[in-house]
């Protein structure tokens, strides 16, 4: 243990982490930059903060304050000690509705403050798009704004007082009239009054540099306001008194369509006299599906408020009438507004990929100009992009003249980095020529501080340096930011990654087959760090269960980044740190859909486990659960299911089996079906069906086949009732394709005859445990079996959502060299999709019952649930299914050591929903894992939608 670490452990009550994982998790924020810290401290209180500063001052080690780690300019990274305020100093100390103030700690997430203020009709004005994970301390440090700044200003406008520890350890209470100012600051200001009165551009989003003009006597000598936006370089905030504003009782959202972004930008300033709450802009490039928006190639999102819905709508209608638009819509329904706002909020991640899939990066994320100059500035900005051969799609706070943009810089090669520097220097001059600020929201950090002389001149920058010297004479706090900055092209996070592609098993088609590019997808916007799943969202259940960055999608991506870099995590695929972080990944695939940049941690986990255990002994659960299809097939062949069930019911035998299999002792072993689905199929009396319906092949997945054949039986009945002809996939290998004919007799593979009948398998259990060689073999055998099916026009109906998702996504990505894989993936339909596409005129039975339950996480992430919603509605099954993840997630919840997290995930949404269900409600759970979790934790039997409809057929017949 180093001397510094030992002294910190002795001095503070909070956690001190000098281990590889703690450091790796904080090497980056949401910027292009990377610095490796010496250690991380999670302080308990202000005393801990002061103690850390004292120890670090003695050792001349810098200190960086960090909240949610979503800063865009690199200011939440450092080479010394990182203070993580999110673990302990994250509380709401008090809230006074009468004075409309709240006292907050720096690690408090903004949404938690909004939730506490809402019952009083109040809210905190600024609301960045990262509101679900950014912290008040970070917002103060960056002087954050958000979409409502046209109405309620920046964070500085909402700060009353600040408790701060200065670089020299002074406890200061900052306020107006020089309250709390460190000794010497007033003298600096009094000597530069003329410069301070003339040296700052007049615009609403001037964030760059220090706000020393707030110290002018005519501005109230407001030390707290002046401190906002100092990016942790002047002092460390330990508590803040913030102002709240009255929230409108009702809101309306007018979405205005324009021909292009230029027209939208020109129009934005003209809407400000109507008193909107927001004027946000974005173009079609950033909208995954524009069908939900009015006609246009770019849009302004204009929100209005009022005492009633009618008043809010009337104000929105007045704005629509005043606007020269090509299309418009007004939404007053809160759910509809949230859905539209999600499009805008996800832009910070969506913008990291160009339409052709190439990467784009921050760096010039939030320049701001006077709103009246926005149209002209955008034209010059576009011209500069073209001159440099670059691309980017601007969006952002058009009403405040603040533009966000990700640009396709080449930050991987020396010529590309040099071009990045040239563009940055020229764009800074363009911004200044339009009277703008290099930063309009996220601060200067390392990305822009070097260029501040272009905006302010060298004399003003030297004045900034003098102010920094008063607050922090030892340059202890976040050095290299704002003053005496590091070069904007140093410490780039990509420079440490391997230049040659890493040998991997999956194809990573969206990333050109490059695993490094896949890992680079995570840019740190941290949507995975939300503490509650909003609506149908899933990502990231393990973070919500543990609250640990290590168990967030971003945290895991950071560790994989450091594994590839090899500087901090030095043992590559053998890394225990990466393994432990991935251990609690449920492989729910929620990040694949909910992450704005579509990080697919389930695939990365499978890839890592494949390499990590290559040539090594695997955990017992990989054999017992990962090879589950083999074990269950053996039981079926030997017809020993009753014996297995009997032994599993005897506690000593069950205990031994779970111990040997690496299964959580708290779990019950599910009962096996006495008769498999396939055996039922072979022996059932075939009902006469018409010849006109489409032929579908019903996939006998492992769970339907061996554990819940009633689901398959119900699906057959419903599909046939809808007029479809049902068959099962072949169980012997065919030498030649059928050529499209049905009932063609072809020869069997003799080897298959010796082994008995083979079964198709999606390979899911092998993939989820990282047994990718075995998964490939199983999937190739499956493709061989499916050859005659692929020679027809028939669809493949898969009842188990996780298996359908594996066939749609994992199969073509794992067998990217086999064209049959894509052909099979394209044939896969869910139960509801099959009925909607192949039997559009069929009317399901009217069940007329309320439903509760949970949308399967793989269905949400990969398959989509639109057809399921429409089928339920047609059947009179009323109610919304919850989001999140059930927590069992295939093998995850059965593995030893995962039980507590598994239960915590279930308790988040699905268990409360089921417990609160009214009498007669149908509990829907299409996934076997979901049904098992409900049965074992709540004693409730969940049912597949096919079972409910089949029961309805019986009732109606």
Image (spheres, helix red, strand yellow):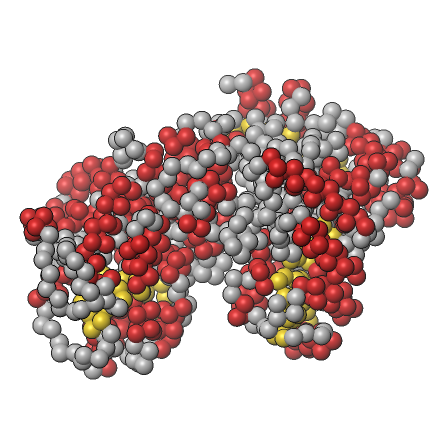
**Relative to 756, is 449 on the left or the right?**
right
Judging depth in this view, the residue of 460 and 96 nearest the camera is 460
Task: Work out whether residue 253 can be spotted.
Answer: no
Going by the picture, which residue comes out furthest to the top? 3
At x 32%, y 69%, the residue is 832
Residue 203 lies in quadrant: bottom right
Judging depth in this view, the residue of 1 and 726 nearest the camera is 726
Judging depth in this view, the residue of 909 and 18 nearest the camera is 18
- Residue 903 x, y percent position in the rendering: 36, 49
- Residue 803 x, y percent position in the rendering: 29, 56
- Residue 285 x, y percent position in the rendering: 58, 60
Residue 574 lies in quadrant: top left
Looking at the image, how many numbered discs can be counted on the residues? 0
Measured along the vertical axis of the image, is residue 791 above or below residue 539? below
Residue 827 lies in quadrant: bottom left
Task: Work out whether residue 724 can be spotted.
Answer: yes
- Residue 892 x, y percent position in the rendering: 32, 46
**Relative to 562, is 674 on the left or the right?**
left
Measured along the vertical axis of the image, is residue 256 above or below residue 150? below
At x 70%, y 27%, the residue is 476
Q: Quadrant of the C terminus?
A: bottom left
**Relative to 46, is 267 on the left or the right?**
right
Judging depth in this view, the residue of 558 and 389 nearest the camera is 389
At x 60%, y 35%, the residue is 414
């Amino acid at each position: 243990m180093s001397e510094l670490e030992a002294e910190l452990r002795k001095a503070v009550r909070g956690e001190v982490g000098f281990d590889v994982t703690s450091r790796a998790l904080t090497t980056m924020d949401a910027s292009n930059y990377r610095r490796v810290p010496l250690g991380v401290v999670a302080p308990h209180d202000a005393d801990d903060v002061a103690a850390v500063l004292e120890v670090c001052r003695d050792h001349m080690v810098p200190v960086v304050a960090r909240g949610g780690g979503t800063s865009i300019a690199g200011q939440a990274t450092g080479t010394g000690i990182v203070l993580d305020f999110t673990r302990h100093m994250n509380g709401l100390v008090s809230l006074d509705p009468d004075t409309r103030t709240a006292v907050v700690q720096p690690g408090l997430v903004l949404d938690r403050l909004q939730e506490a203020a809402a019952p009083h009709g109040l809210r905190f004005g600024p609301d960045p798009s990262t509101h679900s994970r950014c912290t008040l301390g970070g917002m103060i440090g960056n002087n954050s704004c958000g979409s409502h700044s046209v109405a309620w200003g920046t964070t500085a406008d909402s700060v009353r007082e600040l408790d701060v520890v200065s670089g020299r350890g002074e406890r200061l209470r900052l306020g107006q009239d020089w309250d709390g100012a460190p000794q010497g600051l007033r003298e600096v200001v009094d000597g530069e009054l003329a410069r301070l009165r003339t040296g700052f551009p007049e615009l609403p989003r001037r964030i760059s540099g220090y706000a020393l003009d707030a110290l002018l006597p005519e501005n109230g000598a407001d030390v707290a306001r002046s401190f906002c936006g100092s990016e942790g370089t002047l002092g460390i905030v330990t508590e803040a008194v913030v102002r709240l504003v009255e929230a409108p009782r009702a809101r309306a959202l007018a979405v205005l369509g324009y021909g292009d972004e230029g027209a939208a930008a020109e129009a934005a300033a003209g809407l400000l006299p109507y008193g909107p709450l927001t004027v946000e802009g974005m173009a079609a490039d950033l909208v995954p599906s524009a069908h939900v928006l009015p006609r246009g190639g770019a849009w302004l999102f204009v929100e209005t408020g009022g005492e009633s819905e009618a008043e809010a709508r009337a104000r929105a209608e007045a704005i629509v009438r005043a606007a020269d638009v090509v299309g418009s819509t007004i939404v007053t329904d809160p759910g509809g507004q949230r859905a539209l706002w999600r499009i805008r909020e996800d832009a910070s991640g969506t913008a990291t990929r160009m339409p052709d899939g190439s990467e784009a990066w921050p760096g010039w994320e939030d320049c701001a100009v006077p709103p009246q100059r926005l149209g002209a500035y955008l034209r010059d900005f576009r011209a500069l992009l073209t001159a440099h051969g670059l691309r980017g799609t601007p969006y952002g706070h058009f009403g405040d003249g603040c533009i966000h943009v990700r640009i396709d810089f080449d930050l991987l090669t020396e010529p590309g980095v040099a071009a990045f520097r040239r563009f940055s220097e020229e764009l800074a001059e363009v911004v200044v020529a339009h009277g703008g600020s290099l930063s309009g929201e996220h601060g200067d950090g390392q990305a822009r501080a070097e260029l501040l002389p272009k905006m302010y001149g060298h004399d003003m920058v030297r004045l900034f340096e003098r102010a920094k010297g008063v607050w922090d004479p030892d340059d202890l706090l976040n050095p290299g930011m704002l003053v005496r900055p590091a070069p904007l092209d140093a410490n780039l996070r990509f420079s440490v990654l391997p230049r040659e592609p890493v040998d991997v098993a999956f194809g990573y088609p969206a990333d050109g087959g490059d695993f490094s590019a896949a890992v680079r997808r995570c840019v740190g916007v941290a949507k995975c760090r939300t503490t509650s799943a909003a609506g149908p969202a899933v990502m990231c259940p393990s973070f919500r269960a543990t609250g640990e960055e290590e168990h967030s999608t971003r945290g895991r991506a950071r560790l994989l980044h450091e594994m590839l870099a090899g500087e901090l995590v030095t043992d590559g695929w053998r890394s225990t740190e990466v393994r432990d972080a991935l251990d609690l990944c449920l492989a729910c695939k929620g990040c694949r859909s909910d992450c704005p940049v579509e990080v697919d941690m389930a695939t990365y986990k499978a890839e890592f486990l494949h390499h990590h255990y290559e040539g090594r002994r695997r955990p017992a659960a990989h054999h017992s659960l990962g090879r589950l299809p083999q074990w269950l097939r053996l039981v079926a062949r030997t017809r020993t299911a009753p014996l297995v069930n009997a032994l599993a019911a005897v506690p000593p035998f069950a205990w031994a089996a779970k111990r040997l299999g690496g299964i959580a002792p708290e779990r019950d072993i599910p009962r096996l079906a006495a008769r498999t689905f396939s055996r039922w199929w072979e022996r059932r009396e075939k009902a006469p069906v018409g010849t006109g319906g489409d032929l579908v092949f019903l996939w006998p997945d492992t769970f339907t086949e061996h554990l819940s054949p009633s689901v398959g039986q119900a699906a057959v009945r419903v599909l046939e009732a809808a007029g479809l002809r049902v068959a099962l996939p072949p169980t012997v290998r065919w030498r030649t394709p059928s050529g499209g004919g049905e009932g063609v007799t072809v020869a069997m593979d003799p080897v298959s005859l010796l082994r008995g009948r083979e079964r198709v398998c999606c390979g899911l259990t092998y993939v989820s445990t990282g047994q990718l060689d075995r998964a490939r073999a199983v999937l190739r055998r499956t493709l061989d079996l499916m050859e005659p099916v692929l020679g027809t026009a028939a669809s493949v109906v898969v009842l188990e959502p996780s298996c359908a998702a594996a066939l749609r996504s994992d199969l073509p990505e794992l067998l990217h060299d086999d064209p049959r894989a894509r052909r099979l993936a394209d044939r896969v339909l869910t139960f509801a999709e099959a009925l909607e596409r192949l039997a559009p005129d069929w009317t399901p039975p009217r069940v007329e019952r309320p439903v509760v339950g949970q949308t399967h996480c793989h269905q949400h992430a990969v398959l989509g649930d639109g057809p399921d919603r429409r089928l339920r509605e047609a059947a009179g099954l009323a109610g919304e299914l919850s989001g999140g993840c059930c927590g069992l997630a295939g093998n995850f919840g059965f593995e030893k050591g995962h039980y507590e997290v598994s239960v915590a995930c279930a308790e988040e949404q699905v268990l409360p929903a089921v417990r609160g269900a009214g009498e007669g409600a149908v509990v829907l759970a299409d996934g076997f894992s979901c049904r098992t979790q409900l049965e074992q934790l709540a004693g409730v039997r969940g049912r597949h939608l096919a079972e409910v409809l089949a029961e309805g057929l019986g009732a109606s017949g």
